[in-house]
């Protein structure tokens, strides 16, 4: 999956949790400052991202995410490491 | 039409409390209404459509009814909380909470309670419900079963508590006062009003939004069919959910939310808002046989009604209308008729009685609050909806006025009763004469 | 509450055992009721401990209804009700049946019933769902089952105010009695161990791996539990007339709503503080008179910190130096039963002059600078006790109990 596709999917997830249309969510948005998300909503996004991309992430990784870009990077890293050798 | 000319300067008639009741005489008045129902989202529309005999029962579209034998229910067609709640993130609110918050919005607006007022006057919320949302609770659990516990939805977990709709509604509207959820089966909605009235009488609160909310969802829709209480679920007979109807064979589920703004009389006068009615008396009881013994069930309701009338300082002969909970249940409707007849005495033959669940569906926790709103609108307009449906009443029922078409209401005192199949009963007497015209 | 209301009976089913005497002795001994969860498989979870009620056999307690026709919370509530009635010496046969009633609190009601439905749903076996789902599941059936078992025809209500529900139930029972509408009320709370509750708190990261350590700097969370507590309440006049033993008087209560967030408390503990202030005001009791506080004390980092803030706002620095302990350190969080059990504890503290400890306390937290009665019970006369409880939905409740006038 390309970076763009990943970002689009993540924005869809954020939109479902926040009610903000995907088009209104900027690529560089931070969850707490720009989107005003509380910890419960943030966790919901983390769960949905983990589930969508089948990441099986450790708890700590989900809880430290602060921006959309960090989330995209996390998914990319996971995809890279998941490529069978 | 109104039943009484405006007389805001007239002194209130003395203390309605009589007898052994030790409740101090803070009068509880009604200053607002909010309703979201399958037959309209204002008391006027709901009342008008009921009087016109409109029926909300139709094949369910909200969810897949799978292969269930009964497919009828009373949905709120096209319900969108956005229409009521405006901007804001609705994701944290499930359907029950959205219904509750929407009807609460209407009630707060109707009572003239601004955002600032709600905080300053510490407005609270009392919400009657049977399930909160068993749809949310079950979906949350199934996600854990299907995807693994790490993938359960945190926002749904917040709504897995039965008081979620009350909490979400208080958060949405900023209601910092007492916040209680009340569960007593299908009498929950009336019970929430009675509970709220107690808190105001006792000086625990000045203004409360009180009523009930319930959603239609697959889980309860299936669950009640399996009890055999749903019309048409027992055998191949077509559903007949006409209250008191000769051929009735159960109830059909509905949904909705309805709230009254209850207020201490002095608070309403301080705010200068119209007093629409007085919640003059209420009482609750329980039938330990839970409907297995008809005499016990009827006696339980009779006692509630008698005590509510007593607290209101009214005789049954003063009643202008009754709004009862009959929903098509073969035994439940019979026991409610018997309880009413025993409590009302001679008035059982003369006071017009309505039961709206044949048209609106059995909306469980919302049902009692809808009954109250229908009753109060009927008192205001001088017309009580008929008991819809072409089915004629069961022969021999001890009630005289179960006509299918609207009746004139000639006295402004009304009674709402609820008799729930798990044993709970509740009765409330509203006095329209204590109110001032709008 | 014009007429003073008193507690004359206590019945308990808890992770520390059934029955008031066993419970109280184990509580004072600082025993733990926590053990690996047995009611469902936790192997897919990162946490495994719970506060389950062990060796509970409904057949030993339910006499008139068919025990197997009831959910577990109903069964436990009936057991607690019988014990409380016996303890009080109330003879139901001497009271008109419409003059006695039940008000209960809960978080989830009978969650095991909907979980059974969910199992069948996921297995594609909805055909096997019978009438028992709706006969057992809706939470109002808990007080209904109690009243049907005992033959009580008065006020009957469930107030599912989540983890503060027991206090809401006791408060409302006082209103019913105080306004002369009943002679005797049973009030309390009940919840059965729940996969739904466990999954949710586990997902929030709110469950402790090893132990529940309220107010400790290293606290890692709560531990879900189950149980039931029922109190017998009646007017002081009636209790005196029949020469009943009185544990404590319910002096007053306060109920508020944060109106802030479903699962997170107000950042300054505002609603919690208002509930305490309201309860003191309603009781006509000065903050200085309070001799013991039963904390909500779940052991989550946030709850205990905010609870400390709120208690300090009301009672001053270090909550006025008052002992404030959390029995959840021993029982886990029994959800809808918790504040009912804790109300019973407040009554017993006043009666016995002993304060149960907060166990597992190792390292003081400057953000929870309180006398949490660490690890050892304490002998201390208490005349006024406050029970605090907070819940999802921002529902807050504070109850004040006091020594009965002699």
Image: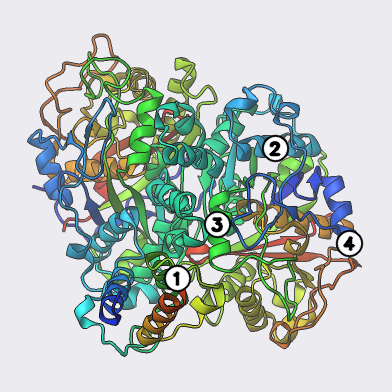
User: Which quarter of the figure has residue B263?
Assistant: bottom left
Of residues C240 and C291, the one drawn nearer to the viewer in this rendering: C291
The reply to whether the C-beta atoms of the residues labelled 4 and 1 are less than 8 Å apart is no
**Left or right of B130, for residue B234:** left
Closer mark to the observer between disc 4 and disc 2: 2
Name of the residue lying farthest toward the front: A85
Q: Do labels 1 and 3 share a chain?
A: no
Rendered view: B47 above or below B249:
below
Q: Residue at x 31, y 36 (%)?
A: B415
The CA distance from mark 4 to mark 1 is 67 Å
The reply to whether the C-beta atoms of the residues labelled 1 and 3 are less than 8 Å apart is no
Q: Name the residue under label 2.
A: C81
The CA distance from mark 4 to mark 3 is 39 Å
The CA distance from mark 1 to mark 3 is 33 Å
Mark 1 falls within which chain? A
Residue B367 picture location, percent across and down: 31, 40
User: Which quarter of the figure has residue C238?
Assistant: top right
Q: What element carries label 1?
A: loop
Q: Name the residue under label 3.
A: C199
- Look at the image and tell me whether residue B17 can be seen: yes
Name of the residue lying farthest toward the right: C379
Of residues C118 and B60, the one drawn nearer to the viewer in this rendering: C118
Q: Do labels 2 and 1 share a chain?
A: no
**Left or right of A78, for residue C355:** right
The reply to whether the C-beta atoms of the residues labelled 4 and 3 are less than 8 Å apart is no
Q: Which residue is drawn at 24% across and 13% down?
A: B394
Q: Name the residue under label 1.
A: A84
Closer mark to the observer between disc 2 and disc 3: 3
Closer mark to the observer between disc 1 and disc 3: 1
The CA distance from mark 2 to mark 1 is 62 Å
The reply to whether the C-beta atoms of the residues labelled 2 and 3 are less than 8 Å apart is no
Q: Mark 4 points at which residue?
A: C353
């Amino acid at each position: 999956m390309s970076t763009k596709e990943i970002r689009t999917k993540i924005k869809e997830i954020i939109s479902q949790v926040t009610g903000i249309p995907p088009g209104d969510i900027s690529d560089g948005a931070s969850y707490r400052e720009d989107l005003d998300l509380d910890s419960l909503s943030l966790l919901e996004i983390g769960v949905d991202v983990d589930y969508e991309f089948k990441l099986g992430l450790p708890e700590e990784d989900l809880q430290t995410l602060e921006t959309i870009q960090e989330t995209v990077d996390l998914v990319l890293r996971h995809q890279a490491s998941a490529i069978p050798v | 039409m109104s039943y009484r000319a405006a007389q805001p300067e007239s002194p209130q008639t003395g203390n309605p409390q009589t007898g052994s009741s030790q409740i101090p005489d803070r009068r509880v008045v009604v200053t607002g209404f909010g309703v979201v129902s399958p037959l309209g989202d204002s008391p006027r529309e709901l009342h008008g459509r009921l009087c016109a005999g409109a029926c909300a029962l139709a094949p369910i579209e909200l969810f897949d009814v799978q292969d269930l034998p009964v497919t009828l229910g009373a949905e709120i067609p096209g319900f969108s909380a956005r229409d009521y709640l405006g901007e804001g993130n609705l994701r944290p609110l499930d359907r029950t909470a959205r219904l509750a918050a929407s009807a609460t919005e209407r009630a707060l607006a109707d009572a003239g309670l601004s955002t600032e007022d709600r905080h300053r006057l510490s407005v609270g919320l009392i919400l009657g419900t049977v399930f909160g949302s068993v749809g949310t609770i079950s979906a949350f659990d199934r996600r854990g079963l299907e995807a693994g516990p790490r993938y359960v939805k945190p926002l749904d977990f917040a709504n897995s508590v039965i008081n979620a709709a009350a909490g979400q509604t208080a958060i949405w509207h900023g209601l910092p006062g007492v916040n209680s959820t009340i569960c007593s089966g299908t009498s929950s909605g009336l019970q929430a009003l009675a509970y709220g009235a107690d808190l105001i009488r006792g000086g625990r609160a000045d203004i409360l939004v009180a009523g009930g909310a319930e959603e239609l969802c697959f889980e309860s829709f299936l669950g009640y069919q399996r009890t055999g209480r749903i019309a048409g679920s027992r055998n191949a007979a077509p559903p007949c959910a006409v209250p008191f109807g000769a051929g009735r064979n159960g109830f059909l589920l509905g949904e909705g939310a309805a709230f009254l703004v209850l207020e201490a009389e002095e608070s309403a006068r301080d705010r200068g808002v119209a007093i629409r009615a007085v919640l003059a008396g209420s009482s609750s009881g329980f039938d330990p046989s839970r409907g297995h013994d008809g005499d016990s069930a009827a006696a339980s309701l009779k006692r509630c009604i008698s005590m509510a009338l007593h607290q209101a300082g009214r005789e049954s002969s003063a009643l202008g209308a009754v709004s009862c909970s009959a929903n098509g249940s073969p035994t439940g409707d019979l026991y409610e008729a018997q309880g009413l007849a025993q409590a009302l005495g001679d008035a059982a033959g003369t006071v017009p009685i309505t039961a709206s669940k044949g048209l609106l569906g059995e909306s469980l926790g919302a049902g009692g609050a809808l009954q109250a709103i229908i009753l109060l609108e009927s008192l205001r307009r001088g017309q009580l909806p008929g008991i819809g449906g072409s089915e004629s009443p069961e022969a021999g029922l001890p009630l005289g006025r179960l006509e299918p078409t609207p009746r004139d209401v000639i006295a402004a005192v009304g009674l709402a009763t609820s008799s729930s199949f798990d044993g709970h009963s509740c009765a409330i007497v509203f006095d329209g004469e204590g109110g001032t015209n709008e | 509450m014009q007429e003073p209301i008193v507690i004359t009976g206590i019945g308990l089913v808890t992770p520390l055992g059934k029955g008031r005497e066993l419970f109280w002795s184990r509580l004072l001994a600082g025993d733990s009721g926590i053990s690996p969860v047995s009611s469902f498989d936790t192997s897919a979870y990162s946490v495994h401990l719970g506060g389950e009620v062990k060796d509970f056999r409904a057949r030993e307690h339910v006499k008139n209804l068919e025990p197997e026709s009831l959910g577990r919370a109903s069964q436990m509530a009936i057991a607690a009700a019988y014990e409380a009635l016996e303890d009080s010496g109330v003879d139901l046969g001497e009271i008109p049946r419409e003059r006695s009633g039940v008000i209960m609190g809960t978080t989830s009601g009978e969650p095991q019933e909907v979980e059974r439905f969910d199992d069948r749903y996921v297995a594609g076996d909805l055909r096997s769902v019978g009438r028992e789902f709706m006969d057992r599941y809706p939470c109002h059936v808990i007080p209904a089952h109690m009243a049907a078992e005992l033959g009580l025809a008065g006020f009957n209500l469930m107030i599912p105010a989540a983890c503060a529900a027991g206090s809401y139930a006791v408060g409302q029972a006082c209103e019913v009695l105080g306004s002369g509408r009943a002679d005797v009320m049973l009030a309390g709370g009940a919840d059965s161990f729940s996969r739904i509750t466990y999954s949710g708190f586990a997902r929030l990261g709110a469950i402790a791996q090893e132990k529940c350590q309220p107010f400790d700097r290293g606290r890692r969370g709560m531990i879900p539990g189950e149980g039931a507590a029922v109190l017998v309440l009646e007017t002081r006049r009636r209790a005196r007339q029949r020469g009943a033993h009185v544990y404590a008087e319910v002096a007053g209560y306060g109920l508020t709503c944060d109106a802030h967030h479903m699962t997170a408390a107000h950042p300054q503990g505002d609603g919690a503080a208002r509930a305490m202030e309201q309860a003191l005001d309603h009781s006509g009791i000065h903050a200085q008179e309070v001799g013991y506080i039963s904390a909500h004390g779940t052991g989550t980092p946030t709850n205990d910190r905010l609870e400390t803030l709120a208690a300090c706002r009301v009672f001053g620095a270090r909550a006025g130096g008052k002992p404030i302990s959390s029995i959840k350190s021993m029982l886990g969080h029994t959800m809808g039963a918790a504040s009912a059990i804790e109300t019973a504890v407040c009554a017993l503290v006043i009666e016995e002059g002993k304060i149960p400890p907060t166990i597992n306390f190792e390292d003081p937290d400057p953000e929870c600078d309180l006398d949490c009665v660490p690890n050892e019970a304490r002998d201390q006369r208490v005349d006024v006790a406050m029970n605090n409880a907070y819940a999802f939905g921002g529902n807050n409740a504070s109850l004040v109990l006091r020594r009965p006038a002699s």
